[in-house]
């Protein structure tokens, strides 16, 4: 039975064209009808997803789930910018590095382009995103167990080069640090082997790679699923005590962070640990305390009070230097945080601003940003000194 038996041909044509028109309108309006994530909605989604991991019973599983979900919904720049705006919140501050680490790995798994993934990221929350991207790259290339040195020399050594106008020295440093993490992952936590792989880079670059190796060793020392093979609970100076001299500065730096994690941020106890290691590395130890303090509490007054627990002026100054370095690495645009901290100091204010002058070239390649950072300094003498550094 035909439809034209019931509907006149003219009416049938009208219905036909109306259906076509409705279909076209639905097609054209589909971008409006399909829910889209605005910046406000993105923030309302991203921040709770990360905060939930703070109190999660299984934090590691929470990190992975949050990261995978965010990678499916948002571009890296959206997530990183929102986290950067909110990282002072305690529940974000303490877990954002781990979440962004897994987020970076998820982004690489989606794009399979390590260079693109690195360019799309930044150093928010101690560059957790960079670290995850590089670990994802190693997984993708099957770099577990035995590693072919020739492959690393050819492929890996160029991944972190400062080969464009946007990548800063800080970006390069964090990339190298991420490679250190990845080397440990690829070698099944073989610390001496991982350090040897870092040696494919020039000495200054290799040092940043060492930092990733030692941080990974320190982290895995408390991981029940993958315990470190280079860790002795009753000897906090190990494995530094068995390594070549060229590794010791960074080894004691990261070993200090392990001590902090073990004592829950007891700064007097950690300064006491520094007095027990070889004298040549006590400055590194005190600087590491400054870096750790800045991670535990973003409040500048609390950081100042904690550094003042150093047993002498030299330790306190090194602690201040470590704070400035850590703030510079932690925040994507650190000038406000650094200047605020330096401005409240008493004895070591000049040293604080000098450390800023020494390091700020690592934080940005944009002269306007650097000048704006100097202009934040209210004291004329320190502001002038900062600007002169740029000349």
Image (cartoon, grey):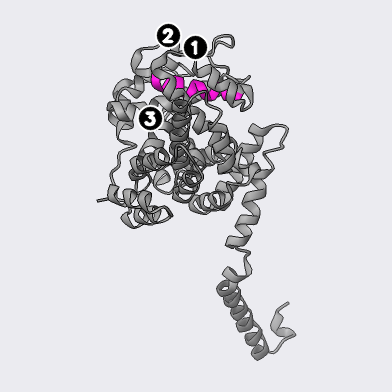
State whether residue 39 appears in this view: yes
| Residue 365 seen from this side | no
State the residue at coordinates (64%, 87%).
14
From what the image shows, is residue 242 above or below residue 335?
A: above
| Residue stretch rendered in magenta on the structure | 249-261
Badge 3: how crowded within 10 Å, few (<14), some, or many (20+)?
many
Identify the image quadrant of the N terminus.
bottom right
Q: Which residue is tagged 2?
A: 242
Figure quadrant of residue 245: top left
Q: CA distance from mark 3 to mark 1?
A: 20 Å
Q: CA distance from mark 2 to mark 3?
A: 20 Å
x and y, in percent, of residue 269 in the image: 59, 20
Q: Give the mark, 2 or 3, whose residue is nearer the N terminus.
A: 3
Q: Main secondary structure of the magenta part?
A: helix
Residues under numbered marks 3 and 1 in contact, where contact means CB atoms less than 8 Å apart? no
Instruction: Give the numbered dot on residue 208.
Output: 3
Disc 1 is placed on an element classified as: loop
Q: Nearer the viewer, residue 123 or 346?
A: 346
Residue under pointer 1: 238
Disc 2 crowd rating (10 Å Cα; few below 14, some 14-19, many 20+) is: few
Using a 10 Å C-alpha cutoff, classify the residue at mark 1 as few (fewer than 14 neighbours), some (14 to 19) or many (20 or more): some
Which quarter of the picture shows residue 56?
A: top right
């Amino acid at each position: 039975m035909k439809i034209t038996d019931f509907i006149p041909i003219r009416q049938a044509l009208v219905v036909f064209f109306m259906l076509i028109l409705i279909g076209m309108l639905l097609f054209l309006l589909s971008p409006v009808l399909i829910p889209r994530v605005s910046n406000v909605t993105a923030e309302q989604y991203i921040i709770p997803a990360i905060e939930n991991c703070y109190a999660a019973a299984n934090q590691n599983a929470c990190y992975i789930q949050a990261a995978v979900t965010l990678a499916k919904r948002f571009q890296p720049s959206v997530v990183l910018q929102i986290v950067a705006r909110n990282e002072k919140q305690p529940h974000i501050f303490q877990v954002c590095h781990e979440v962004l680490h897994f987020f970076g790995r998820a982004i690489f798994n989606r794009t399979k382009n390590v260079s693109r993934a690195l360019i799309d990221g930044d150093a928010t929350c101690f560059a957790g995103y960079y670290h995850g991207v590089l670990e994802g790259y190693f997984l993708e290339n099957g770099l577990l167990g035995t590693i072919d040195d020739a492959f690393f020399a050819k492929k890996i050594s160029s991944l972190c080069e400062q080969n464009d106008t946007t990548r800063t020295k800080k970006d390069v440093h964090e990339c190298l640090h991420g490679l250190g993490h990845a080397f440990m992952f690829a070698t099944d936590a073989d610390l001496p082997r991982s350090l040897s792989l870092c040696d494919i880079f020039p000495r200054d670059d290799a040092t940043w790679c060492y930092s990733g190796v030692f941080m990974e060793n320190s982290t895995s020392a408390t991981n029940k699923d993958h315990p470190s093979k280079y860790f002795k609970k009753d000897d906090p100076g190990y494995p530094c005590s068995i390594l070549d001299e060229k590794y010791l500065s960074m080894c004691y730096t990261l070993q200090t962070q392990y001590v902090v994690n073990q004592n829950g941020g007891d700064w007097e106890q950690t300064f006491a640990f520094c007095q027990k290691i070889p004298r040549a590395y006590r400055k590194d130890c005190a600087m590491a305390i400054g870096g750790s303090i800045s991670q535990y509490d973003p409040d500048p007054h609390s950081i100042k009070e904690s550094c003042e627990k150093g047993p002498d002026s030299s330790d306190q100054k090194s602690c201040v230097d470590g704070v400035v370095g850590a703030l510079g690495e932690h925040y994507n645009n650190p000038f406000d945080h650094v200047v605020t901290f330096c401005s409240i100091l008493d004895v070591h204010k000049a040293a604080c601003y000098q450390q800023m002058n020494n390091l700020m070239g690592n934080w940005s390649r944009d002269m306007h940003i650097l000048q704006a950072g100097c202009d934040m300094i209210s004291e004329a003498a320190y502001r002038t000194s900062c600007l002169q550094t740029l000349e």
